[in-house]
Image (tube, grey):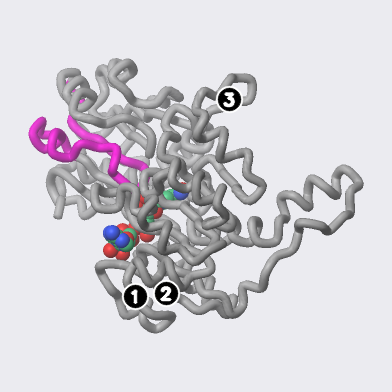
């Protein structure tokens, strides 16, 4: 652990946006147990970061943000004007941060590139098994005294072909699980690694869609992957295949996917992320009218399962997220190179 000088101690005040009770719990535990020399003064705000809420970071040295916080040029400008010098993402994806603007403003930006990839991989598998064996529907039936088995027919995972799009940390963890089921593995990734070659075969994106019974997305959201699952690419999908997205909503063109569900081209869809999830997910809307008709249409299909971006939500992952974020903060405070920096000292 890095040691701070007396002046640096208590020097860091951090506004934590989109803070949920679990964030507060794990950050406070790690801050107290492991980072006593830092004494990061964490100010938790339930509101997401936006132009309207940026003022909450007044008198703070840094902000800590999550997947749906808006960290665009305007927001960064407002933060910098208030004296904020660092942006700390408590997630891996950084598609919501304007890195160019952060660099121009002299802000430090760091993320948590890896935390328990198994948490997300295991959740993707949970979506697949639930959709396949209809345990969600069976649960409701049995509670109502209905023991009818109609429409609960599934298939064996053993011998099926699973296509993994993006074989990084999470894709590889998922591949290992599927191998255990006895699945055949295909992958598409512009960057190939030997660890996957030992489990399955790389192929083109088009061939992966044509051959796979299950397609699971684990690539980051970038300009090149936005709407990777589109009307055009869905034409290559094996008819009736299952599609799973635990990565980022924007990788899928939702309108195209709805049409593919209606035509039967997609046999089942599991989503933990949704392209317009900001403002919708992480909040209890059970007494509200939800105005997103596309999202509401998705929920009407019997073969669609949507969860609210919870794949990361395990004790292990939350502990690692808090530890790495606080380590990143220490590097920022000390001015030492941070290997998790996206902008600033240590950035690659
Ligand atoms: P990673 O960086 O280890 O792996 C990403 C892989 O995608 C890399 O191997 C990369 O080469 C590949 N890739 C890049 N462009 C591609 C393309 N056009 N087609 C196919 N592959 C491509 O990242 P990771 O830790 O495995 O995480 C993957 C994604 O999962 C993150 O970017 C994040 O968006 C998402 N995620 C979601 C949750 C959740 O709770 N739902 C939690 C953590 C991460």
329 lies left or right of 47: left
Label 1: how many Cα within 10 Å (few below 14, some 14–19, many 20+) = some
Q: What residue is shown with label 2?
A: 186
Label 3 crowd bin: few (<14), some (14–19), many (20+), radius 10 Å:
few
Q: Earlier in the sequence, mark 2 or mark 1?
A: 2
Q: Is residue 47 above or below residue 182?
A: above
Q: Secondary structure at mark 1?
A: loop
**Residue at x 52% of width, y 45% of height:** 310
Q: CA distance from mark 3 to mark 2?
A: 39 Å
Answer with the quarter of the image where residue 289 lies: top right
Q: Residue at x 59, y 76 (%)?
A: 181
Q: Secondary structure at mark 2?
A: strand
- The image shows residue 144 at horizontal and vertical percentages of 88, 43
In the drawing, what numbered circle is on residue 285?
A: 3
The disc label shown at residue 46, or none: none
Q: Spatial distance from mark 2 to mark 1, Cα to Cα?
A: 7 Å
Task: Tell me the SS state at disc 3.
Answer: loop
Front residue of 41/91: it is 91
**Residue 88 percent across, percent down from the top left:** 29, 39
Q: Name the image quarter holding the C terminus.
A: bottom left
Q: Which residues are magenta?
A: 83-108
List the single residue furthest toward the bottom.
Answer: 198
The disc, 1 or 3, on the residue closer to the chain's N-terminal end is: 1
* Nearer to me, 317 or 53: 53
Find out whether residue 104 is within the magenta segment.
Answer: yes
Q: Looking at the image, which residue is at 34% across and 76% down?
A: 202
Outermost residue toward the right in this view: 145
193 horizontally vs 154: left or right: left
Q: Is residue 112 visible?
A: no
Residue receiving disc 1: 203
């Amino acid at each position: 652990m890095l040691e701070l000088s007396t002046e640096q101690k208590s020097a860091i005040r951090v506004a934590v946006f989109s803070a949920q009770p679990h964030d507060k719990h794990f950050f406070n535990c790690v801050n107290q147990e492991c980072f006593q020399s830092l004494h990061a003064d964490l100010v938790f705000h339930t509101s997401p970061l936006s132009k309207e809420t940026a003022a909450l970071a007044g008198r703070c040295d840094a902000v800590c943000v999550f997947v749906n916080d808006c960290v665009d040029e305007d927001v960064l400008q407002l933060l910098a004007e208030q004296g904020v010098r660092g942006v700390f993402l408590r997630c891996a994806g950084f598609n919501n941060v304007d890195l160019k603007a952060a660099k121009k403003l002299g802000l430090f930006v760091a993320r948590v590139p890896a935390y328990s990839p198994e948490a997300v991989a295991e959740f993707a598998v949970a979506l697949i098994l639930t959709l396949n064996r209809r345990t969600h529907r069976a649960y409701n039936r049995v509670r109502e005294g209905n023991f009818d088995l109609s429409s609960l027919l599934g298939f064996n995972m053993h011998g099926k072909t699973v296509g993994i799009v993006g074989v990084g940390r999470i894709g590889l963890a998922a591949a290992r699980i599927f191998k255990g089921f006895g699945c055949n593995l295909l992958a598409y990734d512009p960057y190939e690694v030997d660890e996957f070659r030992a489990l399955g075969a790389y192929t083109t994106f088009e061939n992966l869609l044509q051959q796979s019974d299950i397609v699971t997305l684990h690539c980051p959201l970038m300009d090149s992957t936005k709407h990777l699952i589109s009307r055009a690419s869905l034409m290559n999908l094996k008819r009736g295949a299952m599609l799973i997205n635990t990565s980022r909503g924007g990788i899928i063109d939702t309108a195209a996917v709805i049409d593919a569900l209606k035509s039967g081209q997609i046999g089942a869809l599991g989503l933990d992320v949704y392209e317009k999830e900001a403002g919708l997910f992480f909040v209890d809307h059970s007494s509200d009218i939800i105005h997103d008709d596309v999202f509401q249409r998705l929920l009407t299909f019997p073969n669609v399962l949507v969860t609210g971006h919870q794949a990361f939500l395990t004790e292990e992952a939350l502990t690692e997220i808090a530890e790495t974020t606080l380590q990143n903060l220490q590097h920022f405070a000390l001015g030492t190179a941070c290997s998790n920096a996206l902008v600033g000292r240590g950035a690659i």
